[in-house]
Image: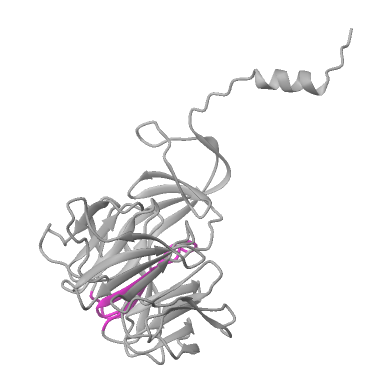
Amino acid sequence: MTESLNKEDVMESLSAIQITERGNRRVGNQCLLKLTSGAEFHQSLTVTGVYRCVHISCVTSDRVWVSDEYKLLLTDTTGVPLHRVKDSCSGSGLHTVNSESELIYIDRNSNINKLSKDMKTTTTFIERTDSTWEPQCVYWSPSTGDLLVGMYSYDTDTAKVTRYNQSGKLTQTIQKDNTGRGLYRKPNYITENNNGDVVVSDYGAVVVTERGGRHRFSYTGHPSGSGLWPHGICTDALSHILVCDDRTNTVQMINKDGQFLSHLLTESQEMGKPWSLSYDVNTHYLWVGSRLHNKVCVYSYIDTQDALTDEETHSSDGEAMSSSTDGDAMFRFSDGEAMLSSTPAVEWR
């Protein structure tokens, strides 16, 4: 005898099924990332219109904003200028690019402006209203859409990091540790790690706080306390922190907890002294600007391997660990290896 089931019967039967989740399951194409034995040089471009590369903000794999102390311009891989910003301020990490490929930069009046993707419209995103504080560096967060700004007061010789939402409203100030001591001396560059940590290239140290503002650590060179003159900074898909050190003329790699891993790059003939950094999560290439001349060099140090999988993914201790960047899941195994989707969101750091 056959009985017909109505909708309520089906829902009741399905609700009785118990599902035990033993690990994160990924089906389809994935990309296994691993550190290579060392950085490999891929290409270089000589940027016409600047005399050295103080900061880099990449837009796509073949377009990049480059600035020295006086000029800010967009170029392609031939080095030919495509657009010039005439009202940018002098400084270090003074520009960043958001998910809409809009340039966000600090102007000569210490306002923070936004240049449209077609480069026809400039609007004031954050107007300077407090004359005691001057923005020094900016970074657009792919994970939250917030803007992080490193600030300095010449009147009081103090510094802080401020966070603004997508409407330009101030939502957070990071300035002191839990003892009341100031965290920063003078922020030069700022970025964010995959776990939400705020990473600042400060005067004499890399200062890292949690997203909520709690101080995690300050990195002062290798061996510990040996001295650091940090400049350009970025993070990669494996949550490493990369920083240019002017004292040793190297790019140093540390993990997300502040442990030194390696000198990824040293002063070389093709690049000279490294000064500025930008990382592309799509190609996993590192773009490095020179302090000595107007050259940008591109390196790879992360190997990508396609992995077709339909099985549970676990770390070495048996528990799957995952992090998310702009909606793209990433499974982390160690500082040198990760499994992630083969179609990551566009994101430059």
Q: Nearer the viewer, residue 229 or 337?
A: 229
Is residue 265 visible to the viewer in this orientation of the structure? no
Q: Point out the residue furthest to the right here.
A: 1
Task: Please tell me whether residue 194 is drawn above or below residue 288 in the rendered image.
Answer: above
Q: Nearer the viewer, residue 66 or 281?
A: 66
Please count the marks in the image: 0
Q: Position of residue 6 (x, y in %)?
A: 83, 20
The way the protein has been coloured in the rendering is one colour
Q: Quadrant of residue 39?
A: bottom left
Q: Quadrant of residue 154?
A: bottom left
Asked if residue 349 lies left or right of residue 225, the reply is right
Asked if residue 95 lies left or right of residue 180, the reply is right
Q: Point out the residue furthest to the left here.
A: 226
Image point 18% across, 73% down: which residue?
157
Quadrant location, the C terminus: bottom left
Magenta segment includes 3 = no
Image point 40% across, 84% down: which residue?
107
Asked if residue 91 lies left or right of residue 104, the reply is left
Task: Please tell me whether residue 252 is drawn above or below residue 64 in the rendered image.
Answer: above
Q: Position of residue 202 (x, y in %)?
A: 23, 68
Q: Position of residue 67 (x, y in %)?
A: 37, 83
Magenta segment includes 283 = yes
Task: Please tell me whether residue 139 is drawn above or below residue 4 in the rendered image.
Answer: below
Q: Position of residue 297 (x, y in %)?
A: 37, 76
Is residue 321 visible to the viewer in this orientation of the structure? yes
Image point 53% across, 66% down: which residue?
99
Q: Nearer the viewer, residue 304 or 253?
A: 253
Quadrant location, the N terminus: top right
| Residue bounds of the magenta highlight | 267-291
